[in-house]
Amino acid sequence: MAAALLLITVFAGTHLGAMALFGSLISLWNTNQSLRSRLRRYAAVAPIFPASMALGVWVGPVPWLAISTEALVIFLMAVGYHVFIVGPGPGPIHLFYACAVGTYLGGSTDIGGPIVAVTAVSTVLTAVLSLSDLLVRGHHSERQAVTAARGAVHAFLHAAAEEGESPRHHEQRIHRLRHTATAAVDHAAAVLSSARSQRVRPSRIRQQLGQELHTLDGLLGTGALAQDYPGAAAHLGNAPHPDPLGQPSARYLLRRTFGRDPVRLPILVGLRCASAGLAAGTLALALHVGHAYWAVLSATIVLHGGLDRNSTTLRAAHRLTGTLMGVLVISAIEPLQPPAAVQIAVIIVSVWGMNLFLPRNYALAATFITMMTLQANVAITSVDATPHLVGQRVLATLIGVAAALVVLVCTGRRMPHRTARRQLTRTLRATTEVLDHAAAGRSFTEDGRKARRDLRFELLACADLLPRLSADDAYLTHCQEISQAVQRQAHAALAAGWHAQPDQLDTTARSEEIRSLLDRLPKQRTHPFM
């Protein structure tokens, strides 16, 4: 990001170079993935940055149209992101950030067109610079993922062989380490799967890593088999389909949100972001805030992660605190009338601070984000206007945070309960399918492999999603026993695939337990406020 900013500033000047910031955000995508995966993701995401900016510039001269367009783009990008992006990522805000900024540039300045060009150049340049790192380090991402999987699997196996603690604590520890190992193997499988083309023979290093991951998957499977089916023999090392499982298909992910037993959390997140953004932008326009898009972004930044109410409220407080701190820093710097080089240096330091503190402390990260964006705005605004600019920033942030909290309180009261039931139902049905394949000796056929892949995905989603849902609905805390039972059944089904004699599997008893769990799932309740 810093290199792209510097290079574009050298050729385009500070006035336009500071706006290269918005295209350089692409460097935050797929940071822990392979070269091929990042190429594919960049090819899909890169056109969105300048196109989003161009759309904002186009509708910017008509304020009410600009706010409505922002809300629509926010909804589409938030839903699309939460449907298709599997695993940790930068969040959907990068996909509509440029559109919001573009509405201001198109409505209040005459440099909207050049900024679109700068955004496009910055996006491509940053992508090339980011990929060059992987060209130098070779198979770094694949090695790192397999190393993490190796450590997690061996930690599970060592713990499973240990004794000396109470049975209950030992079981909880084994379950936790087993889940961690499953997640690590699943992530490594996704990295390796995305790193190679099915039509091209993999390199020697990738073959070695793939074989090691297959061995680790087998060790995890046989270790789990010993836990769930004591005395059962496993066919470690001779499974006929050694390829990594990888991620679910796009079709599966679409059906998951819009098909049978849909987990509609992406739609709720999209509606919340769009509603809060529209309300914040409208209020900012009514109050004649000069940068209404700041209110829109403040609202959506709080909500776009789809966190529970407590975490989202804390995020809102951090956002407000960070904004105030960032405004104070810029207010102290700008009266000194720093030269252009210092302004660019502030942006670069802010980029570094944002990336350093985002996973650690959001209030400090928000401080650097505010410094970064405010300094970029100051670069295209006269110094005399800076006190007015920072005042508008504080007011817009207050409006955005207030709108986000109101929307958060007023929406989605029934969603935790519905989503928990649907997620558990999907996990149990996927468990039944994997058990059927295991009993028929088809675990390592193409259909069996897909069933295991989808169950792993639902299992990991279940472990990630249900604690957040429970934080929003106290009733769901009483369903933790059911949730743990569902996860145990799913793990047992995955372990069954490694059974050397599948005809000896007692699938009837397992199926009865699954049906019993389906009957015990939380029933739909009517919330007193809805």
Image (cartoon, rainbow, N blue to C red):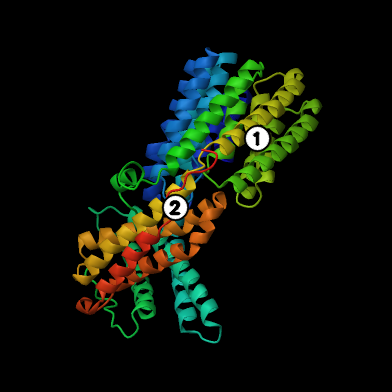
Question: Which label belongs to residue 518?
Answer: none
At horizontal 38% and vertical 44% (from top left) the residue drawn is 84
Q: Residues within 10 Å of mark 2 (few under 14, many from 20)?
A: many
Q: Position of residue 89 (x, y in %)?
A: 49, 47
Which structural element holds mark 1? helix
Q: Tell me which label, 2 or 1, sits earlier in the chain.
A: 1
Q: Three-letter amino acid code at disc 2? A: Ala
Question: Which label belongs to residue 372?
Answer: 1
Q: Position of residue 362 (x, y in %)?
A: 65, 46
Question: Which label belongs to residue 420?
Answer: 2
Using the rendered view, name the quadrant where residue 225 is placed.
bottom left
Relative horizontal placement of residue 98, taking residue 218 as reference (left or right): right
Is residue 189 among what the camera can see? no
When the figure is inspected, residue 200 is found, relative to residue 73, above or below; the finding is: below
Front label number (2 vs 1): 2
Q: Position of residue 306 (x, y in %)?
A: 51, 44
Which structural element holds mark 2? helix
Q: Three-letter amino acid code at disc 1? A: Met
Relative horizontal placement of residue 65, taking residue 509 as reference (left or right): right
Q: Position of residue 516 (x, y in %)?
A: 34, 65
When the figure is inspected, residue 164 is found, relative to residue 202, above or below; the finding is: below
Using the rendered view, name the quadrant where residue 403 is placed.
top right
When the figure is inspected, residue 84 is found, relative to residue 494, above or below; the finding is: above
Q: Nearer the viewer, residue 458 or 127?
A: 458
At horizontal 54% and vertical 50% (from top left) the residue drawn is 473
Q: Residues within 10 Å of mark 1 (few under 14, many from 20)?
A: many
